[in-house]
Image (cartoon, helix red, strand yellow):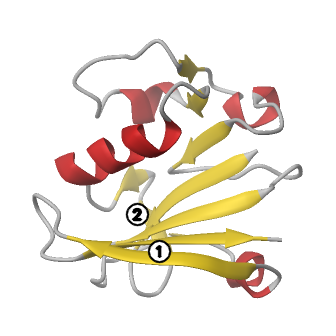
Amino acid sequence: MHVIVCADDKLGMCFAGRRQSRDRLLREDLLALTQDVPLWMEPYSAKQFAEIFENFRIAEDFTRKALPGEYCFCERQLPETGVESVILYRWNRHYPADTVFPQQWLQSRTLQESREFAGSSHETITREVYTL
């Protein structure tokens, strides 16, 4: 599976069980990236999308249900195994966080792509793609 995560400068993902931030243009980029491939997420994450698309798969245990080649949008939990790549959206800011993305996941992978774009609520968002 391909794991999609949003994180701040210190790899913080969420604080008190809630996302740090959200951005409309980031969601558009994410949807363009995943296109017709299944995109798994928990019900909490689905609430930030204006509409539910045909490729969305929503389940509490979504990280266990995703198959190889499918995407998982992870805000509060990460899969234990089966990660093929990590797509990291960086907010380029620092927020309070109590859930942090594990740095070792990036150290064991190769940065294949890095692209900056303007968000709707963030001046710059960076999308990085890490593969084995």
- Image coordinates for residue 97, horizontal then vertical, percent: 43, 73
Distance in Å between CA atoms under marks 2 and 1:
8 Å
Q: Which residue is mark 1?
A: 12
**Which residue sits at x=76%, y=87%?**
107
The amino acid beneath tag 2 is Phe
The amino acid beneath tag 1 is Gly
**Which residue sits at x=63%, y=40%?**
71
Say the numbered circle drawn on residue 15.
2
Q: Residue 73's image quarter?
A: top right
- Furthest toward the top, the residue is 54
At label 2, counting other C-alpha atoms closer than 10 Å, the crowd grade (few under 14, some 14-19, many 20 or more) is some
- Work out whether residue 87 or residue 64 is closer to the camera in this orientation and state it: 87
Contact (Cβ within 8 Å) of mark 2 with mark 1: yes
Q: Residue 120's image quarter?
A: bottom left
- Decide if residue 131 is on the left or right side of residue 6: right
- Image coordinates for residue 108, horizontal then vertical, percent: 83, 82
- Image coordinates for residue 117, horizontal then vertical, percent: 24, 70
Evaluate whether residue 23 shows in this view. no
- Decide if residue 23 is on the left or right side of residue 33: left
- Image coordinates for residue 98, horizontal then vertical, percent: 50, 71
From the image, which quarter does the N terminus lie in?
top right
Q: Give the SS element for disc 1.
A: strand
The residue mark sitting in front, 2 or 1, is: 1
**Which residue sits at x=29%, y=53%?**
26
From the image, which quarter does the C terminus lie in?
bottom right
